[in-house]
Amino acid sequence: MKITFLGTGTSQGIPVINSSHPVCLSTDKRDKRLRVSILIEWGNFSYVVDCGPDFRYQMLRANVSKIDGALFTHEHADHTAGLDDLRPFSFQLGAVPIYAHKRVLNYLSKRFDYILNDNNKYPGAPSVKQIEIKNKPFTIGGLEVIPVKVEHGKLSIFGFRFNNIAYLTDVKTISGVEKLKLKNLDILIINAVRIKPHHSHLNLDEALALIDELKPKKAYLTHISQYLGFHAEVEKNLPENVFLAYDELIVEA
């Protein structure tokens, strides 16, 4: 199984014009982050988790020629605004399956009425097949996917476990019951937005404490803002099994 980090950033990490923040001015490509998303591949199957406003460029940059569907963690714009850019994949595949909680599908139906409302569909809009997921396992491409319910501030959202890889973003807290789904992982991908505490995201210390509790073989930090610091400096101070993810990083398990 191969994971490509399409983006590892957050909307609060987007530099304003003429920003003088030193990380925004970094020449290290690992400090240049698009909105958070991954591509997961196994056998002949390719799925994305979330497609935010950078989705089109991410697909071009990673030279992705096909996807078999998209999974959504939650409805916020930095995770869903690229839905229209499923268009070329739907021309190739037909209706692209999108998997999301009912609340998220309802949100998408309102924001993208011209795509998801058959009575109002715009000619040429992408075709998608909406598949509601609940907090129980489902299958894509013969692979069992286990949703993991986490709290993003006051909003309940999903992370996903694929075999021994788990992808969790926008996490602030996880219940004890849901943590049981995260045992014996080879790879845990988890958010760490900055050094200072945040009301709806794990900061670095909280992410490291959770990694220490769950004890995956390896962990990768994502959903990173400039306030976490320079990639090279942050990674030097991480535990030996924890790594700072960056755009276009590929890991296999």
Image (cartoon, rainbow, N blue to C red):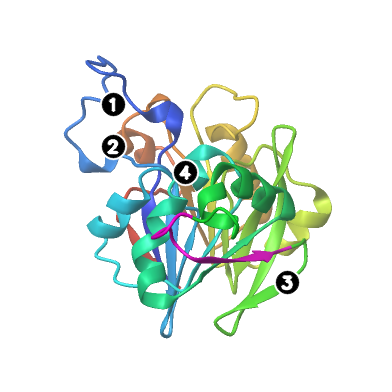
Disc 1 to disc 3, how far (Cα)? 40 Å
State the residue position of label 4.
81
Q: Which mark is residue 101?
A: none
Say few, some or many: other residues with alpha carbon within 10 Å of mark 3 (under 14 / 14 to 19 / 20 or more).
Answer: few
* In the foreground, 116 or 72: 116
Q: From where the camera sits, is residue 132 visible?
A: yes
Q: From where the camera sits, is residue 228 visible?
A: no
Q: Establish if 183 lies above or below 14.
A: below
Q: Residue at position x 51%, y 47% from top?
A: 80
* In the foreground, 153 or 66: 66
Say few, some or many: other residues with alpha carbon within 10 Å of mark 1 (under 14 / 14 to 19 / 20 or more).
Answer: many
State the residue position of label 2.
31
Q: Nearer the viewer, mark 3 or mark 4?
A: 4
Between discs 3 and 4, the one toward the N terminus: 4
* In the foreground, 216 or 24: 24
Task: Determine which quarter of the picture holds residue 39.
Answer: bottom left
Task: Determine which quarter of the picture holds residue 135.
Answer: bottom right
Q: Nearer the viewer, mark 3 or mark 2?
A: 3
Q: Is residue 46 magenta?
A: no
State the residue position of label 1.
23
Between discs 1 and 3, the one toward the N terminus: 1
Disc 3 to disc 2, how far (Cα)? 35 Å
Specify the segment rendered in magenta: 122-133
Mark 3–mark 2 contact, CB under 8 Å?
no
Q: Give the SS element for disc 3.
A: loop
State the residue position of label 3.
137
Disc 2 to disc 4, how far (Cα)? 23 Å
Q: Is residue 177 left or right of residue 95?
A: right
Mark 1–mark 4 contact, CB under 8 Å?
no
Q: Is residue 3 left or right of residue 207?
A: left
Disc 1 to disc 4, how far (Cα)? 25 Å
Q: Give the SS element for disc 4.
A: loop
